[in-house]
Image (tube, rainbow, N blue to C red):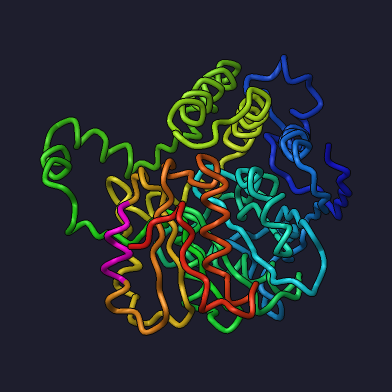
Amino acid sequence: MNRSTITTERVATVGSSAKSSLWPSVLRWIPTSTEHIIASETSLLSTLKTSYVREQVDIGSGPPGTQTKWFGSSSEDHRFINTVTFNSHEDVPTIVMVHGYGASGGFFFRNFDALSTRFRTIAIDQIGWGGSSRPDFTCKSTEETEAWFIDSFEEWRKAKNLSDFILLGHSFGGYVAAKYALKHPEHIKRLILVGPAGFSTSDSMPENLVRFKASWKGAIVNHFWESNMTPQKIIRGLGPWGPNIVRKYTSARFGSYSQGDLLTEEESKLLADYTYHTLAAKGSGEFCLKYIFSFAAYARKPLLHSASEWKVPTTFIYGQEDWMNYQGAEQARKDMNVPCEIIRVPKAGHFVFIDNPSGFHSAVFHACRQFLSRNSEEQPLPDNLISV
């Protein structure tokens, strides 16, 4: 079992409200709270062998030296990024892991033990998700929304005094990681994008999806999309029935979808509990959806259009059954002026790091071989991976 060390500088406000947290969860319509999120993360990480440190990293109330407050807020409250660090040794490379939409850093729980044998491994909850601060979402444009995530991550980096690290982002976290690397390439020595969002353009929308969008059903879906109807709103609206719905989803998604390493019964239960509490807490970062993506999750500002501006060597990792299309990465690679490789992991879907963790670890180690071995150029791609 884990022999974890946990430090908390200050607990961010992530639940419904301070007053509601005084009520037992069985008496609340939405049975979650700040304490539930942190407790469920702790339970999930208790399945690990590697010790860790948790901290709430203070990013202040706004950019240093200005009168501006974060996210257009008038609040003087400081904001915090929930951060978990495994293997604090400074003589190994640092890898920072950024989760996707509707997730949190704990989703990488099946990877921390393996990655921490070779890296100082840090996982964060992006602002507005998980155990991080959940300020009111005030963004009104794609530019403001991108800045919400990029600038808060940069202040977190400064607070942690990090530089020359490997940045890994999954799905929407891959979009944020890529946008961050475009703005601050000097801090990143390798970019790893795992099933990243934002590389396909609406021009490449399949014909059947074009027809659906033009139908009355598509018009209804598009209306809900533009109204920012998020999955989290639905979970909160279900009240006390929400936990069971999430449990059924996680059991179905991670219990039968993968052909790789299936979750144990305990892992499935703990992940379901953790997922529910991160989804049901106060809405914040989730409302980025309509500003970053249009109908069917096509980016409003596709990363494909910025490929020629890439300054950081990049590795793309996709599950072989990933619904994110790796062909967008193939197209981007043609315009990149930095080293770029695309790896597909068999027996895995979009959550490749959960579906086939051993294959995922092999892909990450291969991507970072130049930092892990003196003979990096002599190391071929492992047999359990596919090069594109």
Q: Main secondary structure of the magenta part?
A: helix
- Asked whether 245 or 234 is in front, the reply is 245
Relative vertical location of residue 198 with respect to residue 63 in this rendering, above or below = above
Q: Does the rendering let one see residue 380?
A: yes
Kindly identify the residue that appears in the image at 53 percent across and 65 percent down: 366
Q: Does the rendering let one see residue 145?
A: no
Kindly identify the residue that appears in the image at 43 percent across and 41 percent down: 347
Q: Position of residue 323 (x, y in %)?
A: 34, 44
| Quadrant for the C terminus in the image | bottom left
Magenta range: 325-332
Q: Is residue 159 left or right of residue 377?
A: right
Image quadrant where residue 198 sits? bottom left
Kindly identify the residue that appears in the image at 51 percent across and 59 percent down: 363
Residue 330 inside the magenta-drawn segment: yes
Kindly identify the residue that appears in the image at 65 percent across and 30 percent down: 267
Residue 331 inside the magenta-drawn segment: yes
Q: Position of residue 242 (x, y in %)?
A: 55, 21
Q: Position of residue 164 (x, y in %)?
A: 65, 79
